[in-house]
Image (cartoon, grey):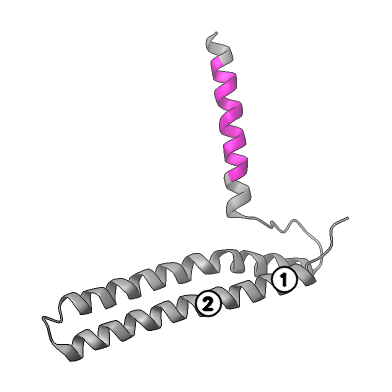
Amino acid sequence: MENLIKLISQRAYAQVGEEIDRQLNPTPWVGGDAGDMIWALLSNVLSRFPYFLGGLAFVALLYAGALYIFSTGDPQKMEMAKKNIVWVIIGVLAVAMIYAALAAVAFLVRPRIG
């Protein structure tokens, strides 16, 4: 019975490990010409791009929120913090639209498999 439990847990761990590898490296470059390598690099960068910018936007919102909280009722500082929050939101929307456009172009020009 113990061997069966070990076997099941090892298989489950192997499947999870493969899925994690696939998520960390969605388009591995195993060989081929330079176009394949460039495509894999572009795909990897684009897949991580939203996470980086999302973190950056989060930090910017924290900063703008801190400005607003510590403005101590000063209307100029409160207005500046509000403008910062609006610009962060506009920036996030702009990046989302650019990312969607890049993803659409990448889908249209990606190498066809099969």
Residue pictured at 61% horizontal, 27% vertical: 11
The outermost residue toward the right is: 114
The kind of residue tagged 1 is Ala
Give the vertical position of 5 relative to 99 (above or below): above
User: Looking at the rendering, in which quadrant would you find the N terminus?
Assistant: top right
What element does badge 2 sit on?
helix
User: Looking at the rendering, in which quadrant would you find the C terminus?
Assistant: bottom right
What element does badge 1 sit on?
helix
Magenta highlight on residue 16:
yes
Instruction: Identify the disc placed on residue 38.
Output: none
The part of the chain drawn in magenta is: 5-19
Q: Is residue 90 visible?
A: yes
What is the x, y in percent for residue 69? 17, 75
Q: Nearer the viewer, mark 1 or mark 2?
A: 2
In the rendered image, which quarter is residue 17 located in? top right
Q: Is residue 34 visible?
A: no
Prevailing secondary structure of the magenta residues = helix
Q: Which residue is mark 1?
A: 106
In the rendered image, which quarter is residue 82 located in? bottom left
The kind of residue tagged 2 is Val
* Pointer 2 local density, CA inside 10 Å: few below 14, some 14–19, many at least 20: some
